[in-house]
């Protein structure tokens, strides 16, 4: 999936997402319009229940809109089947989570290589690429370590390397510094900034409750009650 030079990396057009809770309809997103260009680090802030995670899930093909369109790389992913969405997520989105989601029995490089395993490749065939990514995130000396042997910051760096293994055009990070101390979190933000600004036109989007972390990004989106209050502060 590639976009033309004029297409945003991600576009939301009049996106509504509603959920049914018993007899009540909850509108998590209420007519969102948004264009995000590649090559930038974007943060999404707002109170709990504002719609931040719903916005991120729709970008990543983890959810589909009730109405409106979500396009990534110029493709309307809201029209994809479940099979197409799974394929889209594997190759076009890298996910970074607050709790790392590493497999405890695998080494660092094996955890990084797992997305290739889901594509039917043997882990061993991805070893060199996984090690190269661990070197990029500053973990050249932790290649054979398992998660229990790593610090929180090191585990998050492994998770970031894993998100990059299929060279996706979009990285989505959900509270990536939420379990880290301020110094370690700052290092993770430096790494995400470098990934966005590396010249590959990759878009990095981060949901965070930490306004100081958001202030480190190129663009801040503020959400409240399912709407974007503003797009830059």
Image (cartoon, rainbow, N blue to C red):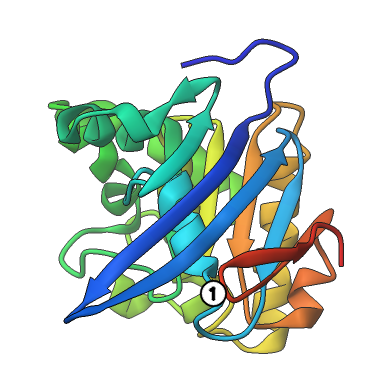
Q: Do we see residue 140 in this rendering? A: no
Is 218 or 147 nearer to us in this picture? 218
In the rendered image, the quadrant that contains the C terminus is: bottom right
Task: Read off the residue under disc 1.
Answer: 153
Is 82 left, or right, of 51 in this rendering? left
Which residue is drawn at the image coordinates 68% and 56% (left, top)? Answer: 191
Against 103, residue 193 (above or below) is above
State the residue at coordinates (75%, 15%). Answer: 6
Q: Residue 54: name its quadrant.
A: bottom left
Provide residue 198's location: percent of width, then percent of height: 75, 35
The answer to whether 154 is drawn above or below residue 193 in the figure is below
Pick the residue in front: 113 or 225.
225
| Residue 195 spot, x, y in % from top left | 67, 44
Q: Position of residue 30 (x, y in %)?
A: 54, 61
Residue at screen point 56% across, 76% down: 50
Residue 24 quadrant:
bottom left
Q: Secondary structure at mark 1?
A: helix
Query: Compared to 14, does 192 lie above or below?
Result: below
Q: Nearer the viewer, residue 182 or 149?
A: 182
- Crowd rating for badge 1 (residues with CA inside 10 Å; few <14, some 14–19, many 20+): many
Question: Which residue in the rendered view is the most extreme toward the front?
Answer: 23
Residue 33 in view here? yes
Whole-percent x and y of residue 145? 33, 65
Toward the top, the furthest residue is 4
Decide which of 196, 56 is in the foreground and name it. Answer: 56
Tell me the quarter of the picture where residue 13 sits.
top right
At a point 63% along the width and 30% down the height, the residue shown is 9
71 to the left or right of 186: left
């Amino acid at each position: 999936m590639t976009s033309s030079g004029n297409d945003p990396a991600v576009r939301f057009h009049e996106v509504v997402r509603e959920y049914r809770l018993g007899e009540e309809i909850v509108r998590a997103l209420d007519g969102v319009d948004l264009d995000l260009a590649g090559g930038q680090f974007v943060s999404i802030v707002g109170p709990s229940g504002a719609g931040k995670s719903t916005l991120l899930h729709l970008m990543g093909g983890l959810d589909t809109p009730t109405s409106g369109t979500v396009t990534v790389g110029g493709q309307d992913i809201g029209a994809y089947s479940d099979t197409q969405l799974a394929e889209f997520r594997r190759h076009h989105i890298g996910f970074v989570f607050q709790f790392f989601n590493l497999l405890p029995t695998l080494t660092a490089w094996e955890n990084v290589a797992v997305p290739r395993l889901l594509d039917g490749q043997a882990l061993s065939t991805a070893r060199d690429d996984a090690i190269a990514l661990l070197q990029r995130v500053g973990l050249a000396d932790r290649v054979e370590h398992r998660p229990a042997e790593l610090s929180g910051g090191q585990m998050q760096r492994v998770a970031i390397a894993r998100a990059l293994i299929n060279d996706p055009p979009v990285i989505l990070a959900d509270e990536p510094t939420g379990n880290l101390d301020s110094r370690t979190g700052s290092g993770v933000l430096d790494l995400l900034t470098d990934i966005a600004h590396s010249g590959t036109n990759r878009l990095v989007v981060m949901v965070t409750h930490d306004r100081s972390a958001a202030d480190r990004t190129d663009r801040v989106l503020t959400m409240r009650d399912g709407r974007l209050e503003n797009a830059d502060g």
